[in-house]
Amino acid sequence: MNDPATIIALVVITLISLATSAEALLRLRGSSNTARASAWPAVGITAAILGSTALFCYRWLVVNEDYALLQAHVDGLLLVAALLGAMVLVLRTRRELRGLAAFMLPVQTLILLWAICAASFTFELFAVATPVKTLHRVGVYLGTLCVAVAAAAGGLYLLTQRQLRNKRGGDPGQPSNPGGNLETVERLIIRTATLGFALLTVGLITGAVIVAASETTRLGAGWWYSPKVLFALAAWLMYAIVMCVRHTTSFRGARAAWLAIVGLALMLGVFGIMSAMPGQSKTNTNIHHAPNHLPDAEDR
Amino acid sequence: MRILMLGVNYRTAPVELREKISFDGDRLDHTLTGLCERYQSTQIVILSTCNRTELYVARPDGKPPNAAQLIEYLAAMGDVDAALLTPVSIQREGEEAVRHLFRVAAGLDSMVLGEPQVLGQVKRAYERAAACGAAGPAMHAMFQQAIAAAKRVRTQTGIADGRVSVGSVAADFAKQIFDRFDDKTIVAVGAGEMIKLAMRHMIKIGPGKLWVINRSVDRARALVDDLGISASTGGARAFDDLDQLLVDADVVLTSTGSRKPIIDVKRFRPLVRRRKHRPIFIVDIALPRDVAADVGQLPNVYLYDLDDLQKVVARTHEQRSGELEQCEQIVRDAVSACYEQLQNRDISELIRKLRELMHDISEVERSRTLRKIESSDAMAIPDAVREILKEHNHRMINKILHMPMHQLNNGGSDVPLGFYAAALRRLFGLDDSQESKPSSATAPAPPGPQRHDPPSPQL
């Protein structure tokens, strides 16, 4: 499973993403001239997108068995990183969300770092033999992409709100202003959280179906209170609340932003349990992992 | 051509005088046409704003109008005593006049440093003169390059960053909280001058509803009328409606004469729930303050007082002043390039005239020589000989002019080109008063690296 080319390429892409993130964060606090002149962010983001996409395709066509699209956790993380980069490119063209890149790019870097770990440590392949399993993974990964954007928007919301409350550092019309207005950012949080909620719901339901349909499940009777499932349910609940902030008004504003960030942390916790703690499979928490030579092992 | 600038501005003349000699609409056209008819071969652009009235003139060397004549004309147009106008007028010639225009266009000579309106006013003044046929090649070059330089100054420096009035700062902060305003409600508490000024900026952002609330409803109605708020978008309300309006409002501007806060936590906290925790932006520009400071600690309440807004204005001024040197450098470079181009155009024109003069002289002398030969030998001179003689003269003129032309085109950094131009005019009696001035806005563009077709579509 440890493909050296994958790891080397991932390290390079991660370094590019890291440099771009650092530049975006500096830009957030930087002077007017650097804010105007530098073309690096677009170059860096584009390079990270192209690199992630190329590596995803390479793994799909060369590394993965039977040309499976999502055969390992690293594939899913690469997909999320590439799509996240594409969203940054699109969103940074909007003046009212120009500061979002500074929050989304670190998330992309984090996901790529995670992908390096996943590429190094994953010892079993996904089983993508049935449509339900494919749907489960697509739901989980695209849901993660949405909640990553929601969390980044949450960070931007908190920063903008803090600057508005402090009445300094974010002078109107100043390039150092993180950009974005609270209303737009809050709307983005709600929309991405709603979409993420829907996709995670699909992921949860299909995950439950997969486990329930297994005749000899490796998860055992107590699978539903395993850390992975509990973390996933907690994250799902966070986004359920964020999605409804327009109706549950006491969760508006900063609280919704915090919930979006905590939700992402919980999702990363789910991935952590799934990927970085392979030993947990023996305690019935790693429902994704199956022996390399048995692609549909989790159904056994 | 000589470049001249004459005018008055906010630094030199009081508003009472400036308003008498300000030009707009038909009066501007009339003045431009009148000046062009009176002073043939002269190019004129009149820049008239609330802060300045300035005439930019390019005239043939040694020909009218001079500054005194322009002042007299202005005084007559404004029905002002010329003796009153002379001491308050400013005059610039040559490169200084060009520099003045460039600085004005870039907002470096404005009352509020870096203000953007003046660039639009310069454009309109130029387009007006071009439309009247008053702007010739020199004015086209000057104004188009001044406008381009001003754009560079605005985009390459921070001179245009920030806001310079309390109202505009408040509007900008509102834009950091809300995305759109057509579904928002703005409430003004008070009906004084401060509220009026701030509301003018708020109206520009297009709110859905605008309410003015005041202890005297009549004064509130007067302000509503003054601001042109229609009944469908708002109006005046009684002071008793304050609580309900605080529930409905997204932005509150307040400036009353009250000695004690009219909005405190005790009053506002219950309203937060009724507002369903919607964000609210409160701008308190009253002294003493109308809103207790601890109201700003409530969730989703953004409270700004006069000090907060003025600090931003002060920072803007400070920041813009810091950008001044960079702006001046851009202007200096642009002025040098523009003035050199103007002088080169002038020299080229002089060289053309000098060459024509030489050829005229040689033609006269050749005819005379041929007549002498024919009369002395009583024989017809073959055409071939005539042509040889013509070519001989032509080559001789070229050789005589070669060295001075070469010096003019390539050297002379020790002596300004203007000196050579003046010397040529004086030594050879070259007068550029006969050069034709474009008679309409579609006059051919001057030669040069950039083509300038007035009025330029890019302006």
Image (cartoon, rainbow, N blue to C red):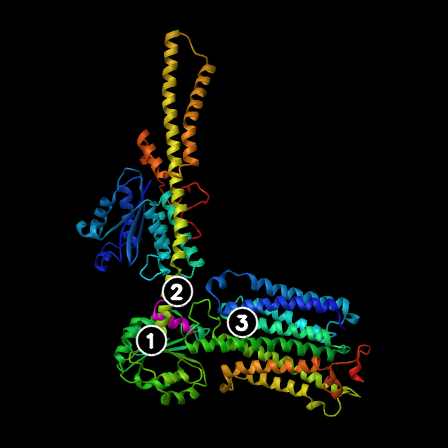
Relative to B377, residue B182 above or below = below
> Do pointers 3 and 1 mark residues of a single chain?
no
Between residue B349 and residue B24, name the one nearer to us: B349
Neighbourhood count class around disc 3 (C-alpha, 10 Å): few under 14, some 14–19, many 20 upward: many
Relative to B141, residue B255 above or below = below
Residue type indicated by callout 3: Leu
Which region shows up in magenta?
B162-174
Residue A39 location in percent, x, y? 55, 61
Q: Residue furthest front?
A: B414
Residue type indicated by callout 1: Leu
Task: Tell me what residue is drawn at x 53 percent, y 66 percent.
Answer: A93
Neighbourhood count class around disc 2 (C-alpha, 10 Å): few under 14, some 14–19, many 20 upward: some
Q: Which mark is residue B104?
A: none
Q: CA distance from mark 3 to mark 1?
A: 30 Å
- Image quadrant in which you'd find residue B136: top left
Residue type indicated by callout 2: Gln
Say whether disc 1 or disc 2 marks the residue closer to the N-terminus.
Answer: 1
Q: Which residue is mark 2?
A: B319
Relative to B152, residue B169 above or below = below
Q: Which residue is mark 3?
A: A100
Q: Which residue is mark 1?
A: B306
